[in-house]
Amino acid sequence: MKNITIKIISIGHITHDVLQIFTEKPQELSFTPGQATEISINKEGWQNEKRPFTFTSLPNDDYLQFTIKTYPAHKGVTNELLQLKKNDELILHDVFGAIAYKNEGVFIAGGAGVTPFISI
């Protein structure tokens, strides 16, 4: 997949350090629940700083959703995400990941590891 620039529709806090970001969904984008993409910020100095984030929306939604724990003290990508607002842009890179729903079971996850299971 080529890099795709998308606009933020809305961005807000779920908790003091967790963001929920809704973005446009490109028609050519395809993913399955549990998969992720690398994201960078379409802003001077941040376009090449890619970080992996899991889709927390469903493939049939007409938007993309990401639920992201931030680390302001690190002064990295997640701290920079805290500065973004509606209509700012992100860059999507390749889709990857092999976590998939196969049938009923028990999910055990904590911290950032819970995000693949949100869409599953």
Image (cartoon, grey):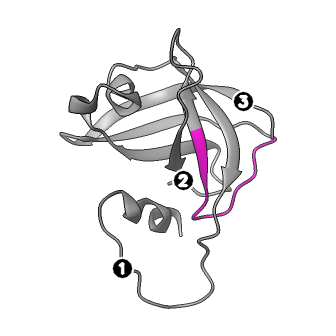
In the displayed structure, does residue 106 sit left or right of residue 91? left
- Region of the chain picked out in magenta, as a range: 28-38
Marks 1/2: CA–CA distance: 20 Å
- Residue at the spot of label 2: 57
Mark in front: 2 vs 3: 3
Labels 1 and 2: the sequence-earlier one: 2
Labels 1 and 3: the sequence-earlier one: 3
In the displayed structure, does residue 46 sit left or right of residue 38? left
Tell me which corner region of the image, top left, top right, bottom left or bottom right, holds residue 19. top left
Q: Which disc is residue 4 wearing?
A: 3
Q: Per the image, is 34 magenta?
A: yes
Q: Position of residue 22 (x, y in %)?
A: 49, 37
* In this view, 86 is above or below 93: above
- Residue at the spot of label 1: 108
Tell me which corner region of the image, top left, top right, bottom left or bottom right, holds residue 7. top right
Marks 1/3: CA–CA distance: 32 Å
Q: Position of residue 80 (x, y in %)?
A: 37, 23
Q: Secondary structure beneath disc 1?
A: loop
Q: Residues within 10 Å of mark 1 (few under 14, many from 20)?
A: few
Q: Secondary structure beneath disc 3?
A: strand
